[in-house]
Amino acid sequence: MSVTAALILVVVALCAASASAFIIPKPVKTRILAFRGAASEIAADAEMFSEEHGDTPSLPPVPATAKRLFLVRHGEVINPGGDKPVYYGALDVPLSSLGEDEAQAAAKYLDRFDLQHVAASPLTRAIYGAHEILHLQEYKTKSDLVVYEGFKELDRGDWCGLTFEEIGADMMWRFDDCDESVTPANGESFPSLKDRVLTARNELLSITDFGNASAVVSHLQVTRSMLSDALEVPTNKMSGLKVATASVTCIDYDISSGSQTVHFQSYKPSVGLQQARDMAN
């Protein structure tokens, strides 16, 4: 063997050894690419991940001192206003056929993780998605579903059935800004919603063991409530957080330090699906 050939072999060996030192082991049942971006960047661009572009987020194992929650929004619904989208809030509106397909895609993504518990809002559009997740989880059935009233969508009260124009831009702006004087009759404000959502979240975390993950299928404003708490986004700014239909958000809760780590926000497994119509909510 020539001196040149020998030197080439040495360089190749050193490069291989160096590369192996930077290989990060993936969690069991995970077949995903390297995660890119910090929580602040995610908050600015909620739809940075899409299987359609081969851009699935990766996850480290759940730390021994932490508990992980996957926050799943339900799929597209059939808006009760038809071609004139109206606010429906906590009304029990059905999923569209696309919404069912979206829920199944989210469940397929979560199949790679072993979930200790699957929770849901009591509304049927969320329960459908939770059942799809349970169907793909080993050793779990529909009877394992845990339903929390606190994960129900924001109650729009007397605004249900009204369009944005009928409610008024100024009223909607004041509502989103947490002016509780404009809370609709028989409805609730963002602060009251967030209080009950975080209570339900804490109940789910209390039955999730350290080092384990659970999932909750709920709604736009419910997911925003938990996400804004994790990102320290003020409640009167949380309406700006993007959460796509049937998207998945992942948060780790370190019980020892009290810290919350948002690994990714609004990841939507959307390969082969048409664009959802995400209108008044």
Image: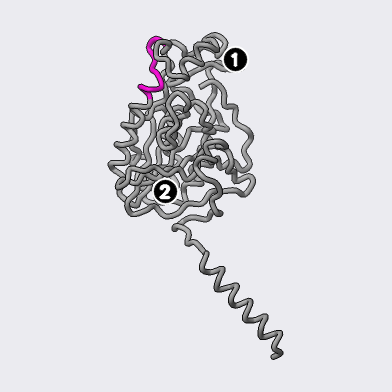
Q: Residue at x 57, y 17 (%)?
A: 85
Q: Position of residue 84 (x, y in %)?
A: 59, 15
Was residue 191 drawn as part of the magenta stretch in this picture? yes
User: x%, y% of residue 206?
Assistant: 28, 41
Pointer 1 residue: 84
Mark nearer the N terminus (2 vs 1): 1
Say which residue label 2 marks. Answer: 137
Quadrant position of the N terminus in the picture: bottom right
Residue furthest bottom in the image: 1
Q: Measured along the vertical axis of the image, is residue 33 above or below residue 185? A: below
In the rendered image, which quarter is residue 277 located in?
Answer: top right
Q: Residues within 10 Å of mark 1 (few under 14, many from 20)?
A: few
Residue 188: x %, y % from top left: 38, 17
- Going by the numbered disc 2, the residue's amino acid type is Gln
Q: Can residue 165 be spotted in the picture?
A: yes
Question: Up-down: is 11 above or below 129?
Answer: below
Image quarter for residue 218?
top left
**Amino acid at pointer 1:** Lys
Secondary structure under tag 1 reads: loop
Look at the image and tell me whether residue 141 can be seen: no
Q: Which mark is residue 183?
A: none
Q: Is residue 217 left or right of residue 17?
A: left
Cα–Cα gap, marks 2 and 1: 38 Å
**Magenta highlight range:** 184-193
Image coordinates for residue 16, horizontal then vertical, percent: 58, 73
